[in-house]
Amino acid sequence: MHIHTSDQESLELGFGNYSCNWGLHMCGLYETEEERDEIVFGFLHKGCEVNDLQLYCPSERTKENFSKEYKEKFPNCAEHVNDPERFILKDAKELYYPDGIFSPRIMDKVLNEFYTVSQKKGKRNIRAAAEMTWGLEAIPGIEHLMVYE
C-alpha cells in the first residue's frame, strides 16, 4: 500500500508491503522485539538492496549485537554493515548526547552536517532509523526531546 506523503520519489519501506514518498519522518510503534525487528531490519535491508546510505542507532541492543543479527538475517548484505560509505552505526550516546547533554540545536547541526557530507559525491538517498528508548533515561536536556522530534 502506498501512502502519499510528498511529491518526492517513492520509497519502499521494507516492511508490511508499505511505500511512501521520500522526506518522511515516522515513528514505528511495536509491542514485541519481533515487531521491532520486522520494522528496523526490513527498512534497513531494503536500503541495502537499493544502495541507500544508512544510519542506524540502536538503544535496545548493542551495535555489535545488531551487526551480528543483521549479517545472519541478510548474508547477501553482510559486509554492508562494515562499510562506512554505506552504513553508519552509532549508539544513542554517540549520536544524541556525546557530551552527556541532549540538545535539539546540536542534533540539528550534526544531522545537517551529516547530510552535507553525504551529498558531496552527488545526490544520495539516506535511510535513518533509531530506537528511541534511550529517551526514557534521565539524561540532561531530555526534556527537549519533543522539540527535536
Image (cartoon, rainbow, N blue to C red):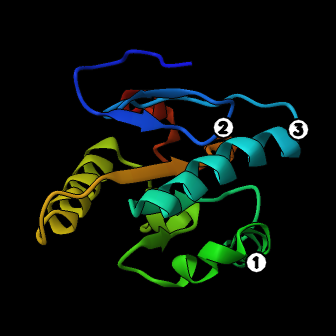
Which of pointers 2 and 1 lies earlier in the amino acid sequence?
2
Task: Tell me: 134 left or right of 103.
Answer: right
Residues 115 and 60: in front is: 115
Which of pointers 2 and 3 lies earlier in the amino acid sequence?
2
Residue annotated with mark 3: 32
Task: Tell me: 35 left or right of 111.
Answer: right
Task: Tell me: 142 left or right of 41.
Answer: left
Residues 17 and 102: in front is: 17
Tag 1's secondary structure? Answer: helix
Does 62 sit above or below residue 108? below
Q: Residues within 10 Å of mark 3 (few under 14, many from 20)?
A: few
Residues 128 and 59: in front is: 128
Q: Which mark is residue 68?
A: 1
Percent x, y of residue 100: 48, 63
Percent x, y of residue 9: 28, 33
Residue annotated with mark 2: 15
Q: Residue at x 68, y 54 (%)?
A: 41
Q: Label 2 to label 3, Cα distance in Å? A: 15 Å
The amino acid type of the residue labelled 2 equals: Phe
